[in-house]
Each structure stands twice: as C-alpha cells, then as structure tokens.
Image (cartoon, helix red, strand yellow):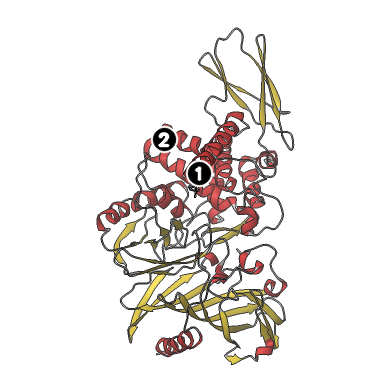
C-alpha cells in the first residue's frame, strides 16, 4: 500500500512539475566532481540506509524521486549536507518525517545544505527525506561521460541505463558522493511503464503492477555509491545456480534483449568459468548472498555491484573470452568488495581489474596468452603523472590524462602487479592480494564484508608478508611518473647494470640470459655486474618480468598518434568550390 500511495505522488510530481522536456544544461563544478576532501557537513554522518524510489518517464526523459535516508550522528549535529544535481528540482525536504521550511535548506550548486530544527546527539539516528524531479543529466558518451542513457531497442521500445562513476551518485539521487559514502543497506523501488523490466542491484524482493506502472523492489547490502544502477528495457532473462568451490551456491542472472538469445546463451556460458577463476585465484565471490548479475546496456559497460553493465556486442577475442565481461566482473572484487578510500588510490580498482585479464588468459591457455595480453597493455603506458599522488583526489582529477595518470591507473597498475608477482613469487603475491581484498588471508563465505583500503595499507601488507621494507618498489613505480631505466654496458667480459630515473635506491634484481643459461644479478645499491665471458648472446630480463623504461614504446605511441591524426584529416570533408 505504501508503494501504491507513493506511486500516485510520483505521477503527480512528475506530470505537474515537468510537462515538457528541458534542454541539457552543464553540470556545476560540485556535481561534476566526485570525491576529494569530504565536506564538513558529511564527515560526522554514518549512512545507515538509503530507501530510494524512482519513477521513470521514458518519453519525457524525466525521473521523479523520493529518497528516505537514515543516518546516525558521529558527533552532535545541527546541520549537514548531501549531494544532488541541481537540475533535479527539490519540492520538499523532511527531518524525521516533519517538513522543513524552505529557508532551512538550499541546493544552489549541487550541495544540499540542511539546517536541522534541533540538535541531533551523538549516536542518535534520524532520517532526511528528499522529494525531487526533473530531467537528469544525459551521458554523451557513457560510461566515460556519466549520466542517463535514453535509447531504444531494435523494435522501438525504451532501453534506459545509468552510468555515473565519474560524476557520482548525485546525478540521480541525494547521496554522499564519496568512495566512503556507502550506506549500510539500500532499498530500491523502480517504477516504470508496464511491461518494461527493471533489474538492479542486490536481491529481487518482488514486483507490483498498478494502472499501467510496474514497481520493482531490490534490496542490496553496502552498495558502492556509484554502483547503484537503473536498467530499464523489455528484458528477457537467463538464470542458473552456480555451485562454488567454497561449498556455497548463488544465482547467476543475465538480462538480455529479445532476439539475442543465441548470443546471450553463449555469453552466459562464460559465467561459471570466470567465476571459478576468480574464486580460485582471489577468493569467494563477495556477494553470494545476493547474486552474480549482468544486464545488457546501450553503452559499453560498468561495474555495477551484482548487476554489471554489459554492452560489448557479444565480442569474441583471440584469447577465447569476452574481456569486457571479465574486466567488469573483476570489479566485484576490486571496486565493490574492496573500495578505495580515496580516488587517489583508484589503481586499486583498475590496475588490479586490468591485471585479471592476462591472468585469466594464463589460466585458460598458459604463458603465451598471458604474455601476449600483457604486451598489449604495456604498449599503452604513458608515464605522464604518478599513479598515486599521496593527496586527496577527485575521480575526475585522477582519470583526466591532462591532470592525472589517466589510463595508467589501468595499464601501468597492471604491469606493476606483474612485476611485483615475479619479485614476491605466487604464494606471497596472491596472499597479499587476498588480504587486501578481504582483510583476511583465509576468506570463507560469511567471514568477511566489503571494506575500504588504500595504497599505503597494501604496502604494509606486502611488507609484512615479504618480511622486508618494500617502499622502494612502490615509491619508484607508483609515486613518481617516470619508470626506472636500466643502463646496460658490456665492457669486455663484464656486463654492468645500473638503475636510473629512480626516486630512491632501486635494488631490483635482474635476470640475464647468457648463451641460453639464466643468471640473476643482485642490485643491492641499484647496480650490479656479471661476468659473461665471450658470450655471443646476452639478453637482459629475457622474460620481461620487470616494468622499465623502454624507448621503443614511446616511439610506437608517437607513430600511432600521428597515424590516427592523419586518418582523421583524410576523412574530413573538403569544402567544394562555388
């Protein structure tokens, strides 16, 4: 009954306030940014629960929202702030079910400031309710540009999805737009025109239908803020039960569009193998109490917790698996189970997530596939900025290649892990990764929950497991832009090696192949030597275990950039003469 009453309110708000579509406006600086330093008005809030109601009007590209947010005060509170795109017009704000006068709240630039009518004492719970409606920001090129995607299926039916990682949850619901802003639990009520389907995060709790509208109810525990997602289309579903190597079982679901059943079944058949890889290499699937879910979206993809977006066109690669599907699934471990506490540590999501592709190729086909995947990734590293700055960052400032490391959080992060794995050995490396992800070296279903972490914690884990101070490794790979460069000089029978371009002493040992015989050269002060005699063939780091400065990659990148620019120039239409 509560949902039916609220449905009537949503219809009234959506129709009365927004009879016509409004043009897209530019995002404010606050809404554009996600993360960074947490505002004072949010630091003392523990987010207990988000009850989120949306009604979606496909033809008008509008939504109406009703958010009931439950918090617990971590200090005495007289005011607070939330984040919500000001394109979404707020009609009322309530404190503990009592409407606040308009003078006690304002949302001029996307930061919703609320003056409380009374002081909330330490550890006391309270609710803030926000009613709003409007035309949410439209993504120009999802998922790189965040917002709503309003598309159509082949037969002209609505096909709608959200992707808001860069700009954040405030594009369509009032939230704490910080990595650490996760609510303990969320209840999602998504109302759409019948007969559309609205798969979302967590566990499906039921669907009700009234007067031509369907309301889908989902419940999710500790959702990553940007991972809460709307997906709306005339979906059909594949489902099966996965029986884990850890003794538990959980549902696998794939929502696809009509006419794609054959391709959908082929992709669905990849789910069990990919899950077994992650459970074997990393540990238990983190959300077995809910589901492993994938939904076909009108954009490429995104790691939405338990409902990963997939729009890769059912691609088939030479490595025998769909890399986009596997990468987004990796984020259930690296991004959703393990969440960076600040966007400065973004590589914990993307570097680890990217490294899972060559690891999976190795799992399927062996070392040649592993090396082939890695070499393609290595060719993309730019080294324009340090992967980790050591300062609080917004998502945008890290992802932007002009201001931050950009794609190096993926590519350089993956190659750093490749090098670390070789240095530590598999046992220590995977133990360190496991502890980073779960907070324990022995994860079992039920003995862990989603957690926040940082680069510094990972360094501490590696130090403890390796039994040595590994700051030299991370200082030179993550906290400076340039890569270590290996100077190689052969002076008669003596091969001399020395590390250059280092932030600190870099004692990385180097393997050398001398006429087919493998040697390891220790580099205790960043330099070492080896007597190679009259050897005809000397190869330094023959397996390419060490990430280092190699000029031919930069030469290739410059050539590729020039080639693409030439192609664009040639494709530009020429102006005809009068």
Viewport quadrant of the N terminus = bottom left
Report, in whole angstroms, how far the alpha carbon at label 1 lies from the one at label 2: 33 Å
Label 1 vs label 2, nearer the camera: 1
Residue 225: x and y, percent? Answer: 54, 67
Residue 379 visible: no
**Furthest-top residue in view?**
534
**Furthest-front residue in view?**
578
Residue holding disc 2: 369
Residue holding disc 1: 568
Residue 98 position (above or below residue 42): below
Residue 4: x and y, percent? Answer: 40, 88
Residue 389: x and y, percent? Answer: 70, 50
* Mark 2: few/some/many CA within 10 Å (<14, 14-19, 20+): many
Q: Residue at x 31, y 63 (%)?
A: 154
* Mark 1: few/some/many CA within 10 Å (<14, 14-19, 20+): few
Q: Nearer the viewer, residue 42 or 315?
A: 315
Q: Nearer the viewer, residue 113 or 530?
A: 113
Q: Provide the secondary structure element on which disc 1 rests.
A: helix
Answer with mark 1 or mark 2, whichever residue precedes in sequence: 2
Q: Residue at x 70, y 42 (%)?
A: 480
């Amino acid at each position: 009954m509560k949902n039916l009453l609220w449905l009537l309110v949503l219809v009234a708000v959506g129709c009365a306030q927004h009879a016509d579509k409004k043009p897209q406006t530019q995002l404010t600086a606050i809404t554009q940014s996600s993360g960074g330093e947490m505002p004072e008005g949010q630091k003392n809030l523990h987010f207990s629960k988000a009850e989120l109601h949306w009604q979606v009007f496909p033809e008008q590209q509008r939504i109406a929202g009703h958010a009931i947010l439950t918090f617990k005060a971590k200090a005495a509170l007289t005011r607070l702030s939330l984040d919500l795109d000001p394109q979404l017009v707020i009609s009322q704000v309530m404190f503990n079910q009592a409407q606040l006068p308009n003078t006690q709240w304002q949302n001029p630039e996307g930061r919703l400031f609320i003056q409380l009518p009374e002081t909330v004492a330490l550890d006391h719970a309270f609710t803030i309710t926000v009613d709003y409606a409007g035309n949410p920001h439209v993504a120009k090129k999802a998922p790189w540009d965040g917002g709503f995607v309003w598309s159509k299926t082949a037969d002209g039916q609505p096909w709608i999805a959200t992707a808001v990682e860069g700009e954040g949850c405030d594009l369509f619901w009032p939230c704490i737009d910080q990595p650490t802003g996760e609510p303990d639990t969320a209840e999602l009520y998504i109302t759409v025109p019948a007969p559309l389907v609205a798969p979302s995060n967590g566990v499906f709790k039921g669907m009700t239908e009234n007067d031509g509208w369907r309301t889908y109810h989902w419940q999710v525990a500790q959702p990553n803020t940007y991972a809460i997602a709307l997906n709306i289309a005339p979906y059909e579903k594949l489902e099966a039960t996965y029986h884990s190597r850890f003794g538990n079982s959980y549902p696998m679901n794939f929502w696809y569009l009509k006419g794609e059943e054959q391709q959908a079944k082929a992709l669905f058949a990849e789910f069990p193998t990919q899950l077994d890889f992650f459970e074997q290499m990393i540990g238990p699937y983190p959300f077995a109490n809910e589901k492993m879910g994938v939904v076909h979206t009108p954009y490429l993809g995104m790691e939405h917790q338990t409902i990963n977006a997939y729009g890769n066109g059912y691609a088939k690669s030479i490595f025998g698996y769909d890399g986009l599907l596997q990468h987004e699934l990796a984020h259930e471990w690296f991004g959703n189970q393990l969440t960076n506490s600040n966007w400065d540590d973004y590589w914990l999501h993307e570097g680890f997530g990217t490294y899972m592709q060559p690891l999976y190729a190795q799992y399927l086909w062996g070392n040649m596939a592993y090396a082939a995947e890695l070499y393609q990734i290595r060719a993309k590293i730019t080294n324009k900025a340090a992967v980790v700055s050591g300062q609080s960052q917004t998502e945008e400032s890290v992802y932007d290649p002009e201001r931050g490391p950009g794609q190096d959080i993926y590519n350089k992060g993956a190659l750093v892990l490749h090098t670390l794995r070789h240095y530590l050995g598999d046992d220590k490396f995977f133990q360190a990764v496991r502890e980073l992800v779960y907070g324990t070296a022995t994860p079992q279903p039920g003995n862990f929950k989603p957690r926040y972490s940082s680069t510094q914690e990972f360094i501490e884990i590696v130090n403890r497991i390796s039994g040595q101070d590994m700051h030299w490794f991370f200082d030179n790979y993550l906290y400076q832009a340039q890569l270590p460069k290996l100077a190689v000089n052969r002076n008669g029978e003596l091969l001399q090696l020395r590390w250059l371009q280092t932030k600190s002493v870099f004692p990385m040992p180097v393997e050398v192949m001398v006429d087919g015989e493998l040697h390891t050269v220790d580099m205790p002060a960043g330099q070492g030597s080896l007597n190679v005699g009259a050897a005809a063939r000397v190869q330094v780091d023959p397996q390419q275990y060490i990430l280092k400065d190699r000029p031919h990659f930069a030469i290739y990148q410059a050539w590729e950039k020039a080639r693409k620019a030439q192609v664009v120039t040639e494709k530009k239409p020429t102006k005809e003469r009068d």
